[in-house]
Image (cartoon, coloured by chain):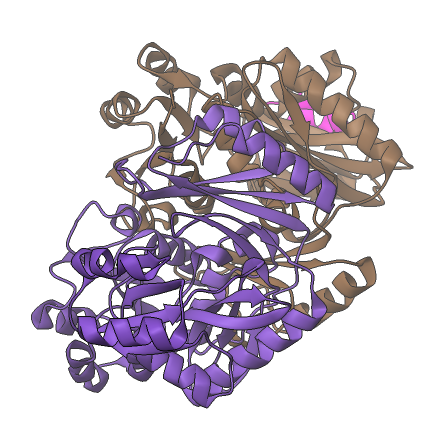
Chain colours: A purple, B brown
Amino acid sequence: MKLSRVGVVGAGQLGRMLALAGYPLGLRCVFLDRSASAPAAQVAPILTGELEDPVQLSALAAASDVLTFDWENISGSALAPLEKLTKVRPPRAALEVSQDRLAEKALFSRLRIPVAAHAGVDNKEDLVKAARQLGLPGVLKTRRMGYDGKGQFVLRGPAQIDEAWSAIGGPGLIYEKFQEFSREISIVGARAATGQTVFYPLSSNVHGGGILHYSMAPFANPKLERTARIYLKRVMNALSYIGVLTIEFFVVKGRLIASEMAPRVHNSGHWTIEGCVTSQFENHLRAICDLPLGSTRTLGHTAMINFLGTMPDVERLLGVTGLAYHDYGKEPRPGRKLGHCTILKGRVTERDSALKDALKWIKWT
Amino acid sequence: MKLSRVGVVGAGQLGRMLALAGYPLGLRCVFLDRSASAPAAQVAPILTGELEDPVQLSALAAASDVLTFDWENISGSALAPLEKLTKVRPPRAALEVSQDRLAEKALFSRLRIPVAAHAGVDNKEDLVKAARQLGLPGVLKTRRMGYDGKGQFVLRGPAQIDEAWSAIGGPGLIYEKFQEFSREISIVGARAATGQTVFYPLSSNVHGGGILHYSMAPFANPKLERTARIYLKRVMNALSYIGVLTIEFFVVKGRLIASEMAPRVHNSGHWTIEGCVTSQFENHLRAICDLPLGSTRTLGHTAMINFLGTMPDVERLLGVTGLAYHDYGKEPRPGRKLGHCTILKGRVTERDSALKDALKWIKWT
């Protein structure tokens, strides 16, 4: 194999699941993270240091045939010098655009992918103007470093402008018109350097407080799936993308409105470990290591439930037939993603009934 | 979880796949092996030392909530003292009986499980007598430490008695009447301390030179499957078994003749990683850690092909749709099991056609 040593920036649960998917393929992941007890560091070797430390990043690049990411918010300036040392996949341009909600929306728009009405906000006057021109309710968000609902404020009326500004105000924000959506869905796909692409079926995602609670897949809606694939492929091709890429959408009056993209494996794709012939983790590795992409055929109907803040009673949960358990090896902390489980069943009704059973034993805290 | 630290004697590929199945469950495997670069040692912590070294075995037991085996030939006398330090699962009695072909056949017979006509052989006179009384052709085998066709000699006529004796002669042998079988099959199942049992569908196994080349599963023969389950359950219950247990059978004129048992996960069960809701590796861990056993429902039709002596071209092989690859991280050596692949398809005809494709790229050396 030409590319078999994979350097991974960040050693969270995504990295952990990448490493576990890599071993059977004969791939060896090495991580860089602040913590030597991070989830991936429990299953693979790690360099400890700050994620943007140029010395440690160079050491990681030197030890790797290809560099990839558990954490996609590494700055372009930290990444640029590494491109001389090794292959950086997904490409830097993809990470940079995904780090800035305004740039991301500009890319979507350029590629004729619908997005919510929005405006850049750098001061309170911008916000007042945006709220007036685009209307309320709306969401004020930081352009950078937001995830799992952090760095967001929902404005329901003009009286909340001051409150929103004191909560997250400052330069580098974006105001988006609130979407009255019927459903949140996402699509995960992979693209190889050869241009080969594969796409997973849609998943339907249920959030609470901005953080994913559970997903159900496949979400069978051929029309939306066709459109989502076209959009994802446009982004992939525009960025000469290599690896797994995810786009989250709102479904608004039967139409897809792109919410955001993630240049990596995604929480809403965890169901593919049990639910598809080849998981998103394996396909990310296959893509970045120049191996043929694997089949995304589904093996049944799945529900993936996140463990947030508290781990459930594993013995109770494993008593649910068809349930697979994923412990990330993290210390519990309110709102923290500690693990997940996936239910795999032959029929939708069986899946729904097992999901109901499993939810009895899971508390999001 | 009450039992989460799993000590494993031997760090081969079975241990490696156990460790990889354990991480998502929150279980941590620690190994004992001679080599710090053994397959499992590449993915989990290891103590290095001889497998029967009482000091290292005690250290392993002390660091574990439960002790289990990648290598089942550890002697009863080395095991006995460990029972005071930790739980030993599967139980010592199961390992001991499986280590001696004569004791194993006596157990099968006591449980009314058909076996080939056989006799103990400790000298050449015994062999002459056995060949005369039981008939030829027959197989002379060492009672202990034989695996993958090693320590066996097929006698086709009386003229070969001298040749057989000089090849493997000595005390502690068994002579078995040769079985004119139509097929070799195996059944894998798991039993928990509670008495809960689960069974995988039969696999049909194709050997070459005594070593497994490939398996196809499920081998759909409801009558044989029912019988095989009854036999496996008898052995499990007789031994108060905990963990995964395998029995290999010959199919002779439509009847099952037990060939041998293995008190562990088995090569002919590797297809369960992709082919079933819960793999044999996960169910072994669930059983020995007192967790509920997982569903053995199949997800399609599989073929599992061993890589022997030479690793195939991974890029070619991953080009076969629906194929999962397993590299054990071993140095190539003639006849050595270096890895395997599993094809998973929805239909038997698709499986057969992909198996044919994959076999083009695999050479057993």
Instruction: Decide if residue B121 is on the left or right side of residue B292.
Output: right
Q: Which residues are magenta?
A: B115-132
Quadrant of the drawing holding the C terminus of chain A: top left
Q: Residue at x 44, y 82 (%)?
A: A108
Quadrant of the drawing holding the N terminus of chain A: bottom left
Q: Residue A296: where, in percent of width, then height?
A: 61, 65
- Check residue A98 for magenta coloring: no
Name, please, the residue furthest toward the front: A159
Q: Residue A338: where, in percent of width, then height?
A: 35, 41
Q: Residue A240: where, in percent of width, then height?
A: 42, 87
Q: Along the line of sight, which residue is nearer the eye, B143 or A241? A: A241
Instruction: Confirm whether residue B294 shows in the render.
Output: no
Q: Along the line of sight, which residue is nearer the eye, B315 or A217? A: A217
Instruction: Decide if residue B358 is on the left or right side of residue A324.
Output: right
Asked if B360 appears above or below B130 in the picture, the reply is below
Q: Residue at x 64, y 68 (%)?
A: A254
The quadrant where residue A165 appears: bottom left
Name, please, the residue furthest toward the right: B253
Q: Residue at x 29, y 81 (%)?
A: A92
- Check residue B124 for magenta coloring: yes
The quadrant where residue B221 appears: top right
Asked if B266 appears above or below B121 in the picture, the reply is below
Q: Along the line of sight, which residue is nearer the eye, A336 or B4? A: A336
Instruction: Confirm whether residue B190 shows in the render.
Output: yes
Instruction: Decide if residue A32 is on the left or right side of residue A130.
Output: left
Asked if B289 appears above or below A6 in the picture, the reply is above
The quadrant where residue A60 appears: bottom left
Q: Along the line of sight, which residue is nearer the eye, A37 or B325? A: A37
Q: Residue at x 38, y 84 (%)?
A: A106
